Image (spheres, helix red, strand yellow):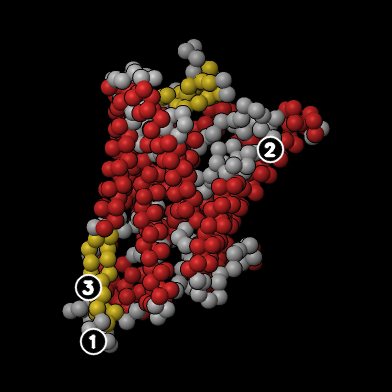
Amino acid sequence: MGWKEAAEPVLTRMPTVQRPEGHVPFKRKLMWTGGVLVLYFFLTSVPLWGLPAGGGQDLFGQFRAILAGGQFTVLHLGIGPIVTASIVLQLLGGANLLGLDTDDPRDQVLYQGLQKLLVVFMVILTGLPMVLSGFLPADQALAQQLGIGIAGVQGLLFAQIFAGGLLILFMDEVISKWGVGSGIGLFIVAGVSESLVTGIIGPRNGLIFNWAGMVLGDTALSVDNVLGSQGQVIALITTLAIFVIVVYAESVRIEIPLSHARVKGARGRFPVKLIYASVLPMILVRALQANLQFLGRIIVSQAGSPTADGRVVIELLGVQMPWLGLYSQTAQGPNSPVGGLFYYMAPIRQPTDWMWWLASGPSQEIWQVVTRVTVDLTFMIIGGAIFAIFWVETADMGPRSTAKQIQNSGMQIPGFRQNVGVIEKVMERYIPHVTVIGGALVGLLAVMANMLGTIGGVSGTGLLLAVSITYKLYEEIAEEQLMEMHPMMRQMFGD
């Protein structure tokens, strides 16, 4: 008996959101989408009950824009467990270790059940160490008041995190089946948009507020202030440039002509976009980096020893390992890596991480900074290309799947026989190459945006995701409106 037969009773009984039996009107889809977004914003404002007044440490703070969720709230984990589970499934599927055929309805159910089971496992694997390691400390006063001890408050904290992880999983499923777009994408757009609005009109460090201070003379008018964190001119230019580049890249495409095999004059085009796999694989790359940094913080918190210069080094089996990880020290404990392997694998988040000639720049040697930038560029470019390939194959966007879709729609490529194998060979000329180029390009743009900075401190990857997801959401809304006006178009779009 294989693993599928053994796991089928469990995987087929995983809770799921029922699919609509027929066509869901566009207005109802908007209502479901809006309702889930309101619930999302509400949950990101509900603080974790049991944390002390000083809060804790946000291990995913630098990745918050792409992992969504809210810091120290019920949705503290955000979409992290969902993304991590997707990475594991893509790696297993890419190595053909699952043995699942996504065209088989039974295997589709098993795949979805396995994904949910992995998400639950990742919620536990991510949330439990945060609570037990003290990054989300238990409030001692509450423990004494309730008489349940520190362990009891830790249990309450983990229960809230666990519930939030499951809620965001089913919220994503509701939008995917009953709403417009993808829940994960909408949550990212919501978080990034909130940061952008705050960065522009925020009452403290907003762009307009800072400019007004310079005009009124409250802030010194200097080159550093205008271009730096006060004026944010470079960040503003970078943000606008990312918007323009992503929208332009989304419109660049190779259009393969199609004609209907039976209906004369019926023609169409199959677009192969430059960013064919979209920018969603960037979530997987950054999530992998986030998990590596999470692992480093857990290790140094449990096996770290202070150094003479006030920092913390990883110590295993009584041996200090600065080559593995050297961290700065704060009142709450080890903070960010400043040396070792985990430092070089940490992404560039802002200009001061690599501009060593600035007073507020990094304290590391020039060669260390250059090495970190090189590693980040290499990781994002190569990782973007690899995960784009995995994404295309998993999402049935590869040459073979695309050829089947064209064949089933009754279309063919003029000048070629109406055969799946023939269409697949034509698609193989374009899709694999465009997928790799697009994935590498998105990785490069993400790193460059981080290096130059963006409005509101939004990461380059987060901004790329927000712009691309919004553009695709606009296309999907236009498609939904077209199908509402012309119901016969639903068959063409596969509704």
Residue picked out by circle 2:
49
Marks 1, 3: nearer the viewer: 1
Badge 3, how many Cα within 10 Å: few under 14, some, many 20+?
A: some
Q: Tell me the quadrant of the picture where the N terminus can be found.
A: bottom right
Badge 2, how many Cα within 10 Å: few under 14, some, many 20+?
A: some
The residue nearer to you, when weighing 445 against 401, is 445
Give yes or no for contact between labels 2 and 1 (Cβ–Cβ under 8 Å). Answer: no
Residue picked out by circle 1:
264
Q: How far is disc 3 from disc 2 in space, using C-alphas? A: 58 Å
Q: Residue at x 33, y 70 (%)?
A: 402
Q: Residue at x 50, y 26 (%)?
A: 335
Q: Secondary structure at mark 3?
A: strand
Q: How far is disc 1 from disc 3 in space, using C-alphas? A: 14 Å
Q: Is residue 409 visible?
A: yes
Q: Residue at x 52, y 31 (%)?
A: 297
Number of labelled discs? Answer: 3
Residue projecting furthest to the right: 147
Q: Amino acid at mark 3?
A: Pro
Hey, which quadrant is residue 479 in on the image?
bottom left
Residue picked out by circle 3:
257
